[in-house]
Amino acid sequence: MKTAEPKEKRSLARALWYWGPVVVYAAAIFHFSSLSHPEDELPELLIRQVSDKVLHLVEYGILGALCCRAFRWAAGPAALKQALILAIGAASLYGLSDEFHQSFVPTREASWLDWAADTAGAIAGAIGWDRFAKS
């Protein structure tokens, strides 16, 4: 039994190392989506100079990369082969749930165009991480 405990601790530490950033980042997305005026929390440069869709691309590009990293290294051998598809699917579904969530926030609305930008960002981020990890 003593030999299994360190292995379990390593597995937990590994899961936290890879999935922790995904959870923290997803929580940050949820937080900003809960605000009626998220622009009050962002630097003015981003609000005035950058398109809303570009912000969605970058935001979900990071999530897609984090998901790909987690599926690739922490989800087990079966997920490794499908890490890219799983990462894109997970980040895109989170984007869809985020749009649904925003439909309940005063002054916010759900937009399929935002979700499309989220998905495009997830694809770019996951592919970018997958290629980086393979090099």
Image (cartoon, rainbow, N blue to C red):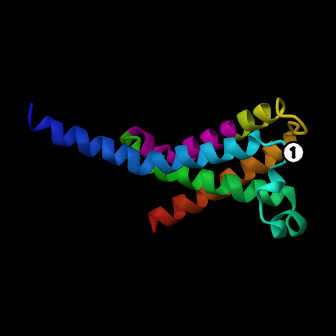
Where residue 85 appears, as percent x and y from the top left, is 58, 44
Q: Does the magenta stretch include residue 125?
A: no
Q: Residue drawn at (32%, 41%), measured in percent from left and top?
A: 12
At x 52%, y 58%, the residue is: 130
Tell me which secondary structure the magenta stretch mostly adopts.
Answer: helix
Q: Give the range drawn in magenta.
A: 78-94
Q: Indicate the position of residue 47 as horizontal and vertical percent values.
A: 86, 62
Left or right placement of residue 6 versus residue 87 in this view: left
Q: Where does the N terminus fall, quadrant-wise? A: top left
Residue that numbered label 1 is attached to:
113
Q: In this view, does 82 lie to the left or right of 34?
A: left
At x 72% / y 33%, what residue is drawn? 97
Instruction: Pick the residue in front: 35 or 85.
Output: 35
Q: In which quarter of the image is the C terminus?
A: bottom left
Q: Residue furthest front?
A: 40
The verdict on residue 81 being magenta is yes
Would you identify the image quadrant in which residue 41 lies? bottom right
Image check: 53 left or right of 78? right
Which type of secondary structure does the marked residue at label 1 adopt?
helix
Q: Which amino acid does label 1 sit on?
A: Leu
Give the number of callouts.
Answer: 1
Q: Residue at x 32, y 46 (%)?
A: 13
**Residue 21, position as x, y percentages in the image:** 50, 51
